[in-house]
Amino acid sequence: MRSLKRSNQHFKKASTKLPLGVSSNFRYWGDDKTIYAKRGRGGRIWDIDDNEYIDYRLAYGPVILGYADPRVDAAAREGIEVGGVFALSTELEYTVAERICRMVPSAEKVRFSNSGTEAVMAALRVARAHTGKDGHIVLEGGYHGVFSEVMWYSEVEDWDPKDGDPEVLPYGDGVPKVTKRMFHTVPLNDVNAIEDLLREHHDIIGSILIEPIMGNCCGIAADMQYMQDLRYLCDRYNVLLIIDEVKTGFRVAKGGAQELYEVRADLCTFAKALGNGYPIAAVAGSDEVMSWIGDDVVHGGTFTGHSVSLAAANKTLEILDETDALKVIEQYGIQLREGLSHILGERDIPHSFAGHPAMLGLFFADETPTDYRSWVDSDYEFYDALAPVLHDQGVLVELDSREPWFMCEAHSRDCLDETLNAFERAVDVTLQKLSNAA
Ligand SMILES: Cc1ncc(COP(=O)(O)O)c(C=O)c1O
């Protein structure tokens, strides 16, 4: 039986100095469920009780090659020797920017930041400067970081369609109400809804911010045609298309979601996989739009272009660009999906998958949801019951079914059979528990 004794003890100590005992609200899983990491290697992590897990959270996506990848870490060590930050730029910024521009056709110019949040903030600011319009559209279920202008969401869990659209609420207290006026939202894949909104409000809406494979909403994906329609509508209404590739970038394809959808963003944002876990992010876009940065738009930050993160990004991108790592990851995801499906099928459990094999969403419903509203029709309560049992069996997935399972190159070495055996046991334990409770 898995013991969390040390994690529980540490939680008590940590919560005396850190709210909820953690550095991010999402890492708190309950007073006796919060676990503390000791180390990670390849596709696995160990907690401070020495429990070993095959990890499909991968820090919410950054770990694309594996934890402590020796190739990236060796580069990062060279980055330490450079000296960190200087309040000056270094030559490596150009090298990494140039690689991004080669991999992502819409990227003609790049600026670096430290986190996805900062990159998306910068993209929205540039869009406001370029269009002269302060509003933006975020698709229901979309998550774009922890800054106020995007910290609103559609409450679908207690929503009754008879009452009209779901209520739009802030993510917690402290989000200024004034930012709600800038925030507009519609369901994904409903082109009429977004067209109606733009027809009525294009004078105040300057951008559409979209993650075409929703990495914070089970990987629910936009249709190919929908993305083409958005491109058309953006051009028609002088609105910028911002594709948030913080999770999809350098994960679902070398050129990100834009490559899969054959669509060109005006601005796009990258973070997670860019540095295999080292903190680095980027906003990129067309020469014309990115050129607002400078005399017109302020962008910067003390830690941008840190020598360690840049060196890690340089090596990570080199590997992703010049090897078949992303194909290996995709293949692993396909095999995992097939294995999970086989186990669930044998037990007549309705299920389906969304997203991309490198970041897959597992649903307990025959039909894959096409928007956040239809996610509520899946049996997410079964997922909620299964996830902690998977932890006991040594497979770490997010407790919230809205977070996809992330794959890394290192998983392919030895994790598949172990994961499937653990999954099979976990499903049976969960079925038994639920039938005992009934
Ligand atoms: C699509 C997307 N955009 C932005 C962010 C914010 O990135 P960060 O957590 O690095 O600030 C996230 C984080 O999960 C994300 O998934």
Image (spheres, rainbow, N blue to C red):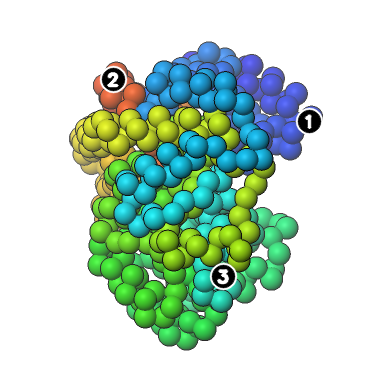
Q: Which residue is mark 3?
A: 129
- Asked whether the beta carbons under mark 2 and mark 3 sit within 8 Å of each other, the answer is no
Q: Which residue is mark 2?
A: 413
**Tag 2's secondary structure?**
helix
Q: Which residue does the image show at 32% across and 39% down from the upper left? A: 358
Q: Which residue does the image show at 49% across and 40% down from the upper left? A: 93
Q: Is residue 437 above or below residue 174?
A: above
Q: Is residue 218 above or below residue 424?
A: below
Q: Position of residue 64 (x, y in %)?
A: 38, 33
In the image, which is nearer the foreground, mark 2 or mark 3?
3
Quadrant of the rendering where the C terminus is positioned: top left
Please name the amino acid that badge 3 sits on: Ala
Can you see residue 292?
yes
In which quadrant of the rendered view does residue 362 lie?
Answer: top left
Q: Residues within 10 Å of mark 1 (few under 14, many from 20)?
A: few
Q: Position of residue 379 (x, y in %)?
A: 38, 49
Q: Which residue is mark 1?
A: 17
